[in-house]
Amino acid sequence: MIGNLLSSRWHALATGIVLSLIAPAAARGDVRATFRLGVEPLGLDPSDTTPVVGSHVGDAVAAYNAASAAYNQVHGYAPGSPMASRAIDASALGLHTTLVTFAPGLELGGDHLRFRLEGLASVSDRLHAFGIGVYPLDIAVPLAGGAVTPYVVAGGTLRWLDRSDVDGETGGLVTLRAAVGARISRRIDVELGVGLYLLGGVYNPDQLQLMSNYDPRGSAPLPTPDRAVAGGEQSGMIDISVGFVL
């Protein structure tokens, strides 16, 4: 559900940006192949008011806390007992991991004004993410001699999220991103980015149903709540990447 909603909301915008900018940029200058390898510390935190994700947070918290209370009652654990299961709040459903992102792309334009389009493939210990990055603002300022070219880019990314440790979820991640960088000897890029705003997460209705139907009298452990819903919002994420230009 999260992935579908995010895709329908941003697909038209991304398509319009690409179609309106790629042709003029190509006409003004060269086309270059690029590749970046970056690290992104993802720290999405939810609340009941988080767009898209927040609609499921309250359900997951209520389902887990009901299962936790039933577990304590059946096993005779008093509140505060070291063996008792503790109630959670929305903060337990954040999505915190570090993405390693591979970003092959195309850069179109001249020496100063360019347009960047990237494919994105990201992995972490428990997530896969695939999507695109579109940067309609890409301004370069070559220094005397041309050995170093500082630049600034601004745009956004849209990715589909998939957990590697459980099946049946849907998810997505939208990022508004700006970055500054330097191109060295026209071939090597070093880039420092900031995620101005990130929204995303994963939702698994089967895991939510499992928590809602949990039987504490059996041998099954309590379900893990963030397998049902995990995600939220983030701002100010700092990422770093290195790459090369063909």
Image (spheres, grey):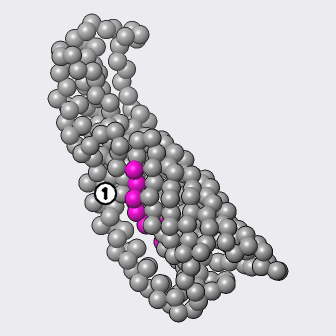
Can residue 106 be seen?
yes
- From the viewer's side, name the closer residue of 35 and 151: 35
Which residue is farthest bottom?
27
Identify the image quadrant of the C terminus: bottom right
Give how far across and how far down residue 34 sits, in percent: 56, 71
Which residue is farthest right?
144
Query: How many numbered discs?
Result: 1
Give how far across and how far down residue 195 sits, in percent: 55, 58
Tell me the quarter of the picture where residue 185 sits: bottom right
The majority secondary structure of the magenta stretch comes to strand
Q: Which residue is drawn at 50% across and 71% down?
A: 105
Is residue 133 magenta-colored?
yes
Can residue 49 be seen?
no
The residue that mark 1 highlights is 3
Would you place residue 20 above or below residue 45 in this image? below
**Amino acid under disc 1:** Gly
Q: Residue at x 36, y 57 (%)?
A: 160
Tell me the quarter of the picture where residue 153 sits: bottom right
Is residue 155 magenta-colored?
no
Task: Describe residue 104's horizontal placement relative to residue 225 as left or right.
Answer: right
Would you place residue 239 above or below residue 168 in this image? below
The residue segment tinted magenta is: 128-134
Q: Residue at x 66, y 66 (%)?
A: 189
Helix or strand or loop: what does disc 1 sit on?
A: helix
Q: Residue at x 41, y 33 (%)?
A: 92
Identify the image quadrant of the N terminus: bottom left
